[in-house]
Amino acid sequence: MNRCWLSVFLFLFCVSACVKKDRAYFLQKGEELKAQLYEELHEVQELADLVTKQDRLKVLFDDTAELAIVAHRFVGFSERSEDVDELSQLLADEIHRVLMIPGARNIFEKCQEAALEKLLLIHSCIEK
Protein backbone atom coordinates (compact mmCIF):
# COMPACT_ATOMS: atom_id res chain seq x y z
CA MET A 1 0.00 0.00 0.00
CA ASN A 2 1.60 3.29 -0.98
CA ARG A 3 2.09 6.09 1.53
CA CYS A 4 -0.64 8.27 0.04
CA TRP A 5 -3.35 5.64 0.38
CA LEU A 6 -2.13 4.68 3.84
CA SER A 7 -2.44 8.31 4.96
CA VAL A 8 -5.93 8.56 3.50
CA PHE A 9 -7.02 5.29 5.08
CA LEU A 10 -5.68 6.18 8.53
CA PHE A 11 -7.18 9.66 8.40
CA LEU A 12 -10.62 8.44 7.35
CA PHE A 13 -10.55 5.57 9.83
CA CYS A 14 -9.68 7.82 12.77
CA VAL A 15 -12.12 10.58 11.89
CA SER A 16 -15.00 8.32 10.99
CA ALA A 17 -14.78 6.12 14.06
CA CYS A 18 -16.94 8.44 16.16
CA VAL A 19 -18.98 10.17 13.46
CA LYS A 20 -22.65 9.71 12.75
CA LYS A 21 -22.97 9.15 9.06
CA ASP A 22 -26.12 10.94 7.97
CA ARG A 23 -26.61 14.07 5.90
CA ALA A 24 -28.27 16.05 8.71
CA TYR A 25 -25.26 15.56 10.97
CA PHE A 26 -22.83 16.91 8.38
CA LEU A 27 -25.08 19.85 7.53
CA GLN A 28 -25.39 20.75 11.22
CA LYS A 29 -21.64 20.51 11.78
CA GLY A 30 -21.03 22.62 8.68
CA GLU A 31 -23.39 25.30 9.96
CA GLU A 32 -21.64 25.28 13.33
CA LEU A 33 -18.22 25.71 11.73
CA LYS A 34 -19.54 28.45 9.45
CA ALA A 35 -20.95 30.32 12.47
CA GLN A 36 -17.66 29.98 14.37
CA LEU A 37 -15.68 31.27 11.39
CA TYR A 38 -18.05 34.21 11.06
CA GLU A 39 -17.74 35.07 14.76
CA GLU A 40 -13.94 34.94 14.66
CA LEU A 41 -13.67 37.05 11.51
CA HIS A 42 -16.32 39.52 12.67
CA GLU A 43 -14.04 40.42 15.60
CA VAL A 44 -11.12 41.23 13.30
CA GLN A 45 -10.82 44.99 12.87
CA GLU A 46 -7.12 45.33 12.11
CA LEU A 47 -4.14 43.21 11.16
CA ALA A 48 -3.13 42.66 14.80
CA ASP A 49 -6.54 41.08 15.48
CA LEU A 50 -6.03 38.64 12.61
CA VAL A 51 -2.56 37.74 13.85
CA THR A 52 -4.02 37.03 17.29
CA LYS A 53 -6.76 34.83 15.83
CA GLN A 54 -4.68 32.94 13.29
CA ASP A 55 -4.25 29.78 15.40
CA ARG A 56 -8.00 29.56 16.01
CA LEU A 57 -8.71 30.18 12.32
CA LYS A 58 -6.27 27.44 11.32
CA VAL A 59 -8.17 24.99 13.53
CA LEU A 60 -11.53 26.03 12.08
CA PHE A 61 -10.30 25.74 8.49
CA ASP A 62 -8.76 22.35 9.26
CA ASP A 63 -11.99 21.15 10.92
CA THR A 64 -13.94 22.35 7.88
CA ALA A 65 -11.66 20.42 5.52
CA GLU A 66 -11.93 17.26 7.61
CA LEU A 67 -15.71 17.57 7.72
CA ALA A 68 -15.85 17.98 3.94
CA ILE A 69 -13.67 14.91 3.41
CA VAL A 70 -15.63 12.70 5.77
CA ALA A 71 -18.99 13.98 4.51
CA HIS A 72 -17.99 13.21 0.93
CA ARG A 73 -16.79 9.77 1.96
CA PHE A 74 -19.97 8.76 3.80
CA VAL A 75 -22.76 10.78 2.26
CA GLY A 76 -21.54 11.75 -1.18
CA PHE A 77 -22.74 15.36 -1.28
CA SER A 78 -22.31 15.53 -5.01
CA GLU A 79 -25.06 18.07 -5.58
CA ARG A 80 -24.56 21.71 -4.68
CA SER A 81 -27.23 24.07 -3.59
CA GLU A 82 -27.51 27.23 -5.64
CA ASP A 83 -29.16 28.99 -2.71
CA VAL A 84 -26.92 31.05 -0.47
CA ASP A 85 -28.23 31.22 3.07
CA GLU A 86 -27.89 34.36 5.16
CA LEU A 87 -25.00 33.05 7.27
CA SER A 88 -23.03 32.06 4.17
CA GLN A 89 -23.48 35.54 2.76
CA LEU A 90 -22.46 37.14 6.07
CA LEU A 91 -19.36 34.94 6.18
CA ALA A 92 -18.47 35.82 2.58
CA ASP A 93 -18.85 39.52 3.42
CA GLU A 94 -16.61 39.16 6.49
CA ILE A 95 -13.94 37.34 4.50
CA HIS A 96 -14.03 40.08 1.88
CA ARG A 97 -13.82 42.79 4.56
CA VAL A 98 -10.90 41.11 6.34
CA LEU A 99 -9.02 40.61 3.07
CA MET A 100 -9.24 44.36 2.43
CA ILE A 101 -7.10 45.00 5.53
CA PRO A 102 -3.55 45.74 4.34
CA GLY A 103 -1.36 42.67 4.91
CA ALA A 104 -4.26 40.39 5.82
CA ARG A 105 -4.36 38.30 2.64
CA ASN A 106 -1.03 36.60 3.33
CA ILE A 107 -1.96 35.74 6.92
CA PHE A 108 -5.42 34.56 5.88
CA GLU A 109 -3.93 32.29 3.22
CA LYS A 110 -1.47 30.84 5.76
CA CYS A 111 -4.42 30.05 8.03
CA GLN A 112 -5.94 27.98 5.23
CA GLU A 113 -2.72 26.33 4.07
CA ALA A 114 -2.85 23.06 6.09
CA ALA A 115 -6.53 22.52 5.32
CA LEU A 116 -5.92 23.07 1.61
CA GLU A 117 -2.98 20.67 1.61
CA LYS A 118 -5.15 18.02 3.26
CA LEU A 119 -7.89 18.48 0.66
CA LEU A 120 -5.37 18.34 -2.19
CA LEU A 121 -3.78 15.17 -0.79
CA ILE A 122 -7.12 13.43 -0.52
CA HIS A 123 -8.14 14.62 -3.98
CA SER A 124 -4.88 13.46 -5.59
CA CYS A 125 -5.11 10.05 -3.89
CA ILE A 126 -8.70 9.57 -5.04
CA GLU A 127 -7.84 10.44 -8.66
CA LYS A 128 -5.00 7.86 -8.85
Image: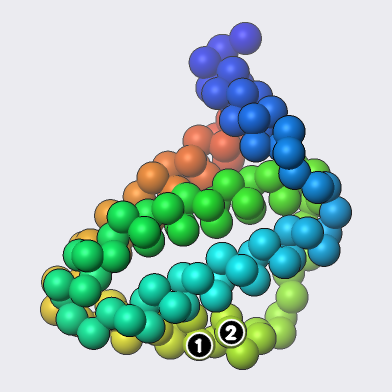
| 10 Å crowding of disc 1: few (<14), some (14-19), many (20+) | some
Looking at the picture, does residue 54 appear above or below residue 118? below
Is 91 on the left-hand or right-hand side of 22? left
Which residue bears the numbered disc 1?
A: 90
Question: Cβ–Cβ below 8 Å for labels 2 and 1?
Answer: yes
Residue farthest to the right? 22
Q: Quadrant of the N terminus?
A: top right
Is 63 on the left-hand or right-hand side of 111? right
* Quarter of the rendering containing residue 2: top right
Looking at the picture, does residue 45 appear above or below residue 30? below
Kind of residue at disc 1: Leu
Which residue bears the numbered disc 2?
A: 87
- Give coordinates of residue 96: x percent, y percent: 36, 83
Residue 78 can be seen in this image: no
What residue is drawn where x is 58% and y is 40%?
A: 123
- Give coordinates of residue 102: x percent, y percent: 14, 78
| 10 Å crowding of disc 2: few (<14), some (14-19), many (20+) | few
What residue is drawn where x is 53% and y is 52%?
A: 63
In three-dimensional space, the C-alpha distance between marks 2 and 1, rounded to whole angstroms, equals 5 Å
